[in-house]
């Protein structure tokens, strides 16, 4: 009986600790590498502005350079609706916890730039009006002002 209770408690605590593992890992890495965290809330299979954001900004070379040059760590909190695109239960729970903390209004797309402590430095509601290069420059500017 003790073994069963111990196993149940371990599962409960591991789920609790894992609920924000991507963000917690990103915070640790960002602190070590002096990076910022870009957290994007999207509906990848139903939100047209989200799809445009990914295609026109996030999937571009200008944006990928931000990651490659250790300017940002990127986290996508996705909320797909189609059955074929569903995420694991664990990832759904983690995304919901991120939304509770950073996107309580349920905006899509909603993109926020965080420091290594998780403080919001800048946010974009909806599809950013900038192109990928201007968006990337804006992120670099925020990072420069953090020094």
Image (tube, helix red, strand yellow):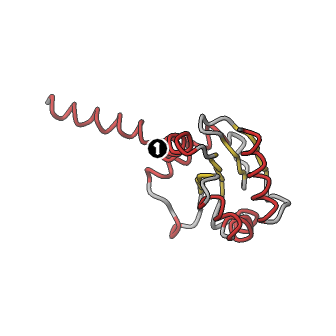
Asked whether 68 or 26 is in front, the reply is: 68
The x and y percentages for residue 26 are 53, 46
Asked whether 62 or 102 is in front, the reply is: 62
Instruction: Determine whether 22 is above or below 109 in the image.
Output: above
Q: Residue furthest top?
A: 2
The x and y percentages for residue 67 are 61, 59
Please tell me which residue is depicted at 26% across the width and 35% down the height of the picture.
8
Q: Give the quadrant of the C terminus.
A: top right
Compared across the picture, whether 134 is left or right of 29 comes to: right
Residue 80 found in image quarter: bottom right
Q: Give the quadrant of the N terminus.
A: top left
Instruction: Determine whether 105 is above or below 67 in the image.
Output: above
Asked whether 20 or 106 is in front, the reply is: 20
The x and y percentages for residue 19 are 46, 41
Compared across the picture, whether 7 is left or right of 67 comes to: left
Mark 1 neighbour class, 10 Å CA radius: few under 14, some 14 to 19, many 20 or more: some
Please tell me which residue is depicted at 55% across the width and 39% down the height of the picture.
31
Please give the residue where the numbered disc 1 appears in the rendered image. Answer: 21
Q: Residue furthest right?
A: 129
The x and y percentages for residue 62 are 71, 66
In this rendering, the count of numbered labels is 1
Compared across the picture, whether 26 is left or right of 89 comes to: right
Please tell me which residue is depicted at 68% across the width and 42% down the height of the picture.
103
Q: Secondary structure at mark 1?
A: helix
């Amino acid at each position: 009986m003790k073994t069963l209770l111990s196993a149940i408690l371990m599962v409960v605590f591991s789920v609790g600790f894992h609920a924000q593992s991507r963000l917690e890992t990103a915070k640790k890495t960002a602190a070590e590498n002096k990076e910022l965290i870009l957290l994007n809330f999207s509906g990848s299979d139903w939100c047209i502005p989200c799809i445009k954001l990914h295609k026109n900004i996030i999937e571009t070379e200008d944006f990928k350079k931000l990651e490659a040059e250790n300017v940002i760590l990127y986290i996508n909190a996705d909320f797909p609706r189609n059955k074929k695109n569903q995420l694991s239960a664990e990832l759904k729970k983690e995304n919901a916890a991120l939304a509770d903390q950073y996107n309580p209004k349920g905006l899509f797309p909603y993109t926020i730039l965080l420091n290594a402590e998780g403080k919001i430095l800048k946010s974009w509601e909806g599809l950013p009006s900038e192109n990928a290069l201007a968006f990337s420059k804006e992120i670099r500017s925020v990072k420069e002002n953090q020094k």
